[in-house]
Each structure stands twice: as C-alpha cells, then as structure tokens.
Image (tube, helix red, strand yellow):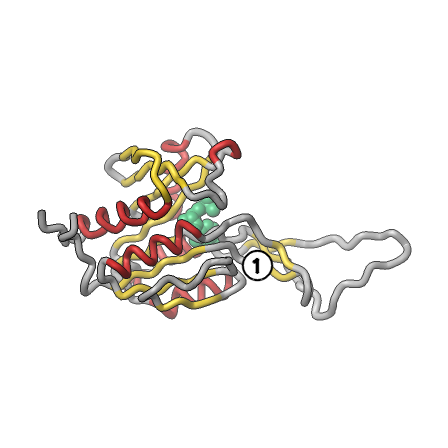
C-alpha cells in the first residue's frame, strides 16, 4: 500500500498524559507514555499529511516532519488543539486527566507538624475529544478517539462513540496483564458507527501505519 497518501490533508494528533498542578512543585499525572500518539503523528506526516502534534510531557523525541506543541495541562491541550484547527482529521490519543486540582496553590504547600494532611478538591477537565467533535464548522472532517477499557470493549466503545460524537474509536484492552500502558504493542478494535474491525496484535508503529492507511482510504486516497 505504498500508494496510500495523505498529501494535501491536515492532521491534528494529541498524545501523552497531562500534568495538573497541585502547587508549583507537585502535580497529578498518569502513566501514558505517548508512544501510540507519537507513532500516529509520525506515520501521518510520513504519508504526507501536514501534521500538528499536541503533546503532554513524555520521554519521547518530537517526531520528524511534525509540528509539535508541548503543553502540560488539559486546558492548555484544548487551547493548542483549537489553535490548530481547521484540520481534515483529528486523532485524540492523549490520556487527558479527567480532573484537575480546583485551586492549585501559588506557593509550595508546607507540611505542618500537627499531622493534618491537605485535602485536594478536584474539578472536571474539558473533554478535548468531545469538544473537537462538536466544533461546528471547524470540526475535523474525521474525528478519531481512543477507548481504553478492561472489559466489554466493543460495547463500551460504541457507547463512547455516541457520547463523544466522534466518527471512529480505536478500542484497546488495557487490562494490566496486556502491558499496553508504556508497552510497545497494542490490540485494537476499530469501531465506527457502522461496524467494528478486529485488528491483530500489532506494534504501536504498525497500528499507526494501519490507521494512516485507513484514513487515506476514508478520504479516497488509496490507489491500489
Ligand atoms: O472518556 P475517556 O477518557 O475514556 O475517553 C477516551 C478518549 O477521549 C481518548 O481519545 C482521549 O484522548 C479522549 N479524551 C479527551 N479529553 C478528555 C478525556 C478523554 O480528549 N478530557
């Protein structure tokens, strides 16, 4: 499928975790490595798409040929995504923190000798996938999200598709025994409004290539 091309298309990809500050030195984060999102951004760029990657903090180098925007919080990720619109395709692979700290402290929170512990009040973060799916005239023509589940993959992915308003969901099994988080492999089920496809166990790089080819096919860019 060397003839699958994304030339002339614009792509937006999110990747990695978000960091939500507690105070100037502490934050809430998660175990996302960014490997899958970065691989997707690299694959789309290699296939010719003008690609923007909005990435939370990861240990990965910026993918070649990609415009990478580094952010920390979900609010910053949303703003960077909005600034990247309009695009033809959006792939939202980031593990966005569901909650932020409602009122992060301006100074480092001190231990006190009484043994009292601070209580963190949380507030909901914006849902970037859902917000991009409802961006009206600026909505990416094809909106793709991920669903990390430990059971009932397809049913939960279908429900997520409806709830978020996106076009495709890549559902993956993140049961601890699969080692998906931080690992190099992924077993994907591509769920669309119409049907679902089971992909074989693939490396995250292969998943990225396969997704790139599916996107090319969607836009009629595959010449067999
Ligand atoms: O709701 P849940 O976190 O399971 O949804 C996962 C999908 O939604 C992923 O594509 C993720 O990138 C996206 N998401 C997002 N913003 C959030 C939460 C999830 O873009 N605040």
The answer to whether 45 appears left or right of 163 in the picture is: left
Q: Dot 1: within a 10 Å radius of its alpha carbon, few (fewer than 14), some, or many (20 or more) residues?
A: many
Q: In the rendered image of this protein, does residue 170 appear above or below residue 135?
A: above
Outermost residue to the top = 152
Residue at left offset 51%, top offset 31%? 177
Of all residues, the one furthest to the left in this rendering is 224
Given residues 24 and 119, the one toward you in this image is: 24
In the picture, measured across the screen, residue 215 lies left or right of residue 37, that is left
Total number of numbered discs in the rendering: 1
Task: Tell me, yes or no, if residue 127 can be seen here.
Answer: no
Q: Residue at x 53, y 63 (%)?
A: 72
Residue bearing the label numbered 1: 19
Residue reaching furthest to the right: 114
Residue 78 in view here: yes
Residue 116: % across, % down? 85, 52
- Picture coordinates of residue 54, whole percent (x, y): 42, 63
Asked if residue 199 is positioned above or below residue 71 in the image, the reply reads above
């Amino acid at each position: 499928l060397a003839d699958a091309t994304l030339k002339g298309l614009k792509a937006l990809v999110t990747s990695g975790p978000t960091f939500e500050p507690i105070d100037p030195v502490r934050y809430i984060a998660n175990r996302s490595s960014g490997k899958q999102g970065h691989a997707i951004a690299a694959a789309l760029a290699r296939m010719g798409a003008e690609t923007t990657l909005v990435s939370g903090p990861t240990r990965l180098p910026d993918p070649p040929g990609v415009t990478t925007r580094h952010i920390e919080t979900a609010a910053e990720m949303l703003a960077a995504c909005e600034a990247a619109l309009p695009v033809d395709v959006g792939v939202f692979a980031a593990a966005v923190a569901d909650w932020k700290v409602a009122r992060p402290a301006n100074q480092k929170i001190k231990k006190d000798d009484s043994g009292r512990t601070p209580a963190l009040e949380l507030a909901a973060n914006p849902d970037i996938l859902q917000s991009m799916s409802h961006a009206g005239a600026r909505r990416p023509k094809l909106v793709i999200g991920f669903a990390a589940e430990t059971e009932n993959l397809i049913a939960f992915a279908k429900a997520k598709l409806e709830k978020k308003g996106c076009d495709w969901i890549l559902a993956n099994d993140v049961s601890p025994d699969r080692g998906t988080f931080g690992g190099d492999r992924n077993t994907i089920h591509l769920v669309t409004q119409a049907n679902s496809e089971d992909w074989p166990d693939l490396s995250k790089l292969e998943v990225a290539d396969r997704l790139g080819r599916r996107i090319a096919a969607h836009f009629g860019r595959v010449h067999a």
